[in-house]
Amino acid sequence: MATPFFLFATGIENSNPTVDGRRVDEMEKCRHYEYWREDLRLVRDFGTTVLRYGPPIHTTYLGPGRHDWDFADETFAEIFDLGIIPVVDLCHFGVPDWIGDFQNPDFPELFAQYAGAFARRFPWVQAYTPVNEMFICATFSAAFGWWNEQLSGDVPFVRALNNIVKGNVLAMHAILAVRPDAIFVQSESSEYFHAENPKAIRPAELLNARRFLSLDLNYGRRVNSEMYEFLLDNGMTRDEYRFFMRSNLKHHCIMGNDYYATNEHRIAADGSMKSSGEVFGYNEITRQYYERYRLPVMHTETNARQGPHGDEAVNWLWKQWANVLRVRNSGVPIVGFTWYSLTDQVDWNSSLRLDAGHVDPLGLYDLDRNIRPVGEAYRQLIHDWRDVLPAQSVCLQVPLVPPFEYREPWAERRRVVLQGIRKTEFVGEHGAAADYGGSE
């Protein structure tokens, strides 16, 4: 059987939205295309169990049934050989030029075809984040007007959210048709909105309801009456809403929630917002999300900049880990932790809107692949805690099959059993999910 373990993870940043028609490719900016072999070996040697990683969709998905797998073939072969367990990130804030943006009503089915094609190409991959941070993707693209369609308003936000979450759901079905024991880690931003004064209570309440929309729809949880009116008033049809309520894949999911110091906000009476910094913290906000969805939890993203003292990121790591332990000790089944990302990132200080080449010192390693103090601290943390956490309960471990055990008889028997169960599940309004992606 698969060995139980706590999922210590990192990631390789692969955001790729467009801004004013310009493609922002973080893999290129962070020189991953140049250093990918070294990056993957750093992951293996570092001691992390899991890597959040995915091929660049805009250069891989060339059209319906058309793919350029060259880079994915090389990198995933190396991942397999190194024994790394990937959580594959298929859509990270951007789509290929030929799809356009998240207003395109064809996106859900086109994305499901891509997900199914990837799963058939790499059947040993078990864990996926089909669409990364669905709420943030819809917000930045169609409410704030920063990325992709660069629209601002409730109608484009709801249309983007509908297409993004439906694409995520259909992609899960398509992947399960190939890999019935697939596990989906929803890496989603966990937010909270604080009212600055009594007049701000109402707008803060609305935003605190709105923050759950992506996961409510993804997990088939009925939204509250006010959010239901909000969705229908801004273009979602009743049939579209019912699609989400019929799609029950929650039992294949881990609720991955991301937390940064920027995830909490101060709301003014006019609805405007600014960062509040850390007020409640990861433990309290995670508890709110867990009580809503009752799913295993993974801390799927956090980081902080290394500042002038050199220990700012190290202190943030310690604080996040203390919160993870608090979540665990309060009885919430938390199964993993992630420092994101492996290397520094570029231009995230402007949320990728400016092409300034500004290096954000957020990584375990800098862009010359030299380890940072937070890298040393995270490596020691993993060493200290790796053998302690799995003793909590073998019943609360993620049933991940390491790549090298994919063909083991026990793993194959398990997939056969799950495939039989899969036949009784809802497979989408367009027929069998196996139809997505055509033949290779």
Image (tube, helix red, strand yellow):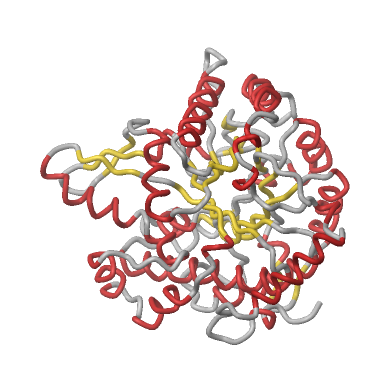
Residue 24 x, y percent position in the rendering: 59, 51
Q: Is residue 403 visible?
A: yes
Residue 257 x, y percent position in the rendering: 49, 46
Q: Residue furthest left?
A: 199
Q: Residue furthest top?
A: 309
Measured along the vertical axis of the image, is residue 12 above or below residue 73?
above
Q: Residue furthest bottom?
A: 431
Measured along the vertical axis of the image, is residue 154 above or below residue 105?
above
Residue drawn at the location 55% of the way across and 74% of the way down:
108
Image-quadrant location for residue 366: top right
Measured along the vertical axis of the image, is residue 167 above or below residue 205?
below
**Relative horizontal placement of residue 270, taking residue 394 as reference (left or right):** left
Residue 369 x, y percent position in the rendering: 75, 29
Along the line of sight, the residue nearer the viewer: 164 or 394:
394
Along the line of sight, the residue nearer the viewer: 176 or 359:
176
Along the line of sight, the residue nearer the viewer: 26 or 166:
166
Q: Quadrant of the C terminus?
A: bottom right
Residue drawn at the location 77% of the way across and 70% of the way down:
120
**Relative horizontal placement of residue 226, taking residue 438 as reference (left or right):** left
Residue 30 x, y percent position in the rendering: 68, 40
**Relative horizontal placement of residue 238, taking residue 5 as reference (left or right):** left
Residue drawn at the location 33% of the way across and 31% of the way down:
279
Q: Is residue 366 visible?
A: no
